[in-house]
Amino acid sequence: MLDPDDETDVGGRPVRSRPVDLDAFFRPSSVAVIGASDTPGRPNTGITRQLAAWAERVGARMYPVNPGRTEVDGRPCYPDLASVPVAGGEPVDLAVILLADPEPVVPQLIEAKVKFAVAFASGFAETGAEGAEAQRRLARLIAEAPTGLRLLGPNTNLNAFERFREDLTGPAIALITQSGHQGRPLFSLQSLGIRLSHWAPTGNEADLEVADFVRWFADQPEVGAIAAYIEGLKDGRAFLLAADHAARRGVPVVAVKVGRTREGARMAASHTGKLTGADDVVDAAFRQFGVIRVDGLDELQDTAALLARARPPQADGVAVYSISGGTGAHLADLASMAGLTMPRLSEQKQDELHQWIPEYLSVANPIDNGGHPVGDWRGRRILDAILADPSVGVLICPITGPFPPMSDKLAQDLVEVAETTDKLVCVVWGSPDGTEDAYRQTLLGSSRVATFRTFGNCVRAVAAYLEHHRFVAGYRSPFEHAPRTPCAGKVKAQRVLRPGQQLSEVAAKQLLRSYGLRVPREQLVTSAAGAVRAAGVVGYPVVLKGSAPEVAHKTELGLVHVGLTSASQVREAFRELTDNARAAGIPRLEGVLVCQMVEAGVEMVIGVTQDPSFGPTVTVGMGGVLVEVLADTAVMVPPFDCLDVRAALDRLRCRPLLDGVRGGPPMDLDALVEAVLRVQRMAVELDGELAELDINPLMVLERGKGVVALDALAVCR
């Protein structure tokens, strides 16, 4: 939830999130249940009793409210909120609405100064246009409440009021879901000894949203990680601000975000009434702000559990230790594919390990012990020696199946050695049964060993763990330096913009010049004679291009001629361009651009588009006429800095071209980064006015010579 009175950037977007104190929601002093019932067989009866039990556990007084009853399950029942005799005259902390239509109750909540309300009712934005309008009315009532009333729902459930195990210790997982059923596997982690502290089922998010809970959970001392199942983001900026807050606090956020495919996006919209943004934009936003995206609920469980409980790494190196060379090789392959570093152990360390492991077995990493050493005193010595190596920060021991009594001894040694070190000890217990004592009692009974059931989930969780700590160690909030005042170029740019229109190339390049982006020397002419004169001024060789607001792909229409070296060539090209324009159905060219022929370099593209959730986004990638075919681009969501730009460029397949290939010189990478940052400034400052921008190609010249925007297309909102 964003604070409209707080600071904003040059585009009018907030740079700080308003914290919502959810303590009175999760641990209220008083709870009113509106529509309470004790009639056998009624759904409201079961809900009323679950809420009564929850209120007792958290130490809250519960007040049934129902005008048709004087008593519910032996408790006095009140006709309305105004009649509730709250102790000390304080307002009710939490009101739970069990009515089919919560809207008529909201004025009563406001009048009674209730702090939080929950609306379970469905039939809102998830059902179509009529329901969406009902949800908008509900949201307006809450937003305009002078008392600061906050609402969870509608279309939510009882997950927030579950019975959490109180006998578990250590850092906990806080859970956020937009579909209650999808959170059930994580809630069940408690049966494996993993602590959960909170569950926020956000439903349709007419008011409270995922971002509110991410921000508040990040401030709770017992929360070691936040796990989320997200179908759509109500407000992308609010989510980024919440993720930024979690990153500053060092609290990992792990999320499943559906909508990667058209089918998933359609189901998400019908389920929660949200629009899912373009998936590459979601990926970019998550990456920039340290949100760890996983695909499955099993990955969500394993990754969140590891990040919640593991101590910071002492080294990035991963050692794989197994009783089988084949098992070690298999896991080593997966680890390398996941980007993990597997350092080769020193000759001295290998000699040490060979005191207990036969000489013919490889112990360079992965470490193969052959099996027998794990069954006696040697097993513990080997583990101690591996973990003593300064290059090793993580030990992974895959046990593909039980082989008692040796596997029992190995499990016990792993648990005991984990208690002696701050380094991460992971075990993959591959038995499909999972009822063995070595697994259920020994491994799961330890809070210091991270236990997995599959190789893949283990290596991906370890990769996320190491990446999270690298990320937070170097994190600098981009909101701290987001520009608050517009630059001088904004006024010049606004003179060029034409609402609802596509600009001509000439106008689009004026837009670029307003923000300090370099374009070629060029002149717009309307006659062949004028083209010849302009070519003399610009300097041969030249390029001629037809220019008109409605023209997007000039090359395909025959409206570009390159490498012209004489007046006769210029005259002939001018005539051909005008003929081709008429043939293409372009009634009138604005003119013909006579452009400087820029030296060869690497053709890149920089673009701006609008995302429905995150607002303006910036894309950079391989440019030229094959930009759509190559599809080698990276997306960034403002605000971002030069390090984010360089990281985005490093993800491109074409990145080696910028370093120079086949003996060629390196390109001006610094100038390219600066150009992307200038486009970001333009996108943010002109948000609301500029719908699309496409600089293609942006020619990146050799180092020290800069970049030149050879062509540009701009569409105004």
Image: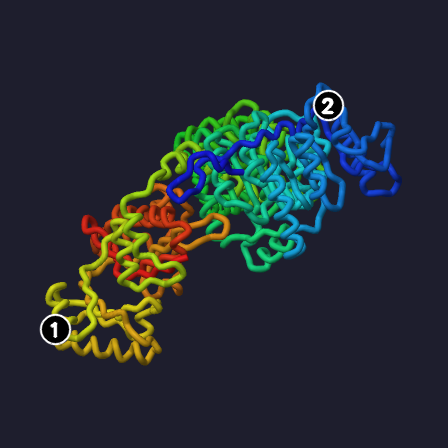
The answer to whether 547 is drawn above or below residue 103 in the figure is below
| Residue visible at 51% across and 38% down in the picture | 2
| Residue visible at 67% across and 27% down in the picture | 27
User: Element under label 1?
Assistant: loop
User: Element under label 2?
Assistant: loop
Dot label at residue 566: 1
* Mark 2 crowd level (few <14, some 14–19, many ≥20, 10 Å Cα): few
Quote the CA–CA distance across marks 2 and 1: 89 Å
The answer to whether any part of residue 52 appears in the image is yes
User: Residue 563: which quarter of the image?
Assistant: bottom left
Question: Residue 483 at what x, y percent from top left?
Answer: 35, 39
Amino acid under label 2? Gly
The answer to whether 662 is drawn above or below residue 685 in the figure is below
Left or right of residue 64, residue 678 in this image = left
| Residue visible at 28% across and 72% down in the picture | 589
| Residue visible at 14% across and 74% down in the picture | 529
Count all numbered tags in the image, as a single digit: 2
Amino acid under label 1? Ser
Q: Which residue is mark 2?
A: 59
The answer to whether any part of residue 375 appears in the image is no
User: In front here: 503 or 79?
Assistant: 79
Sequence-wise, the earlier of marks 2 and 1 is 2
Question: Residue 369 at what x, y percent from top left?
Answer: 53, 36
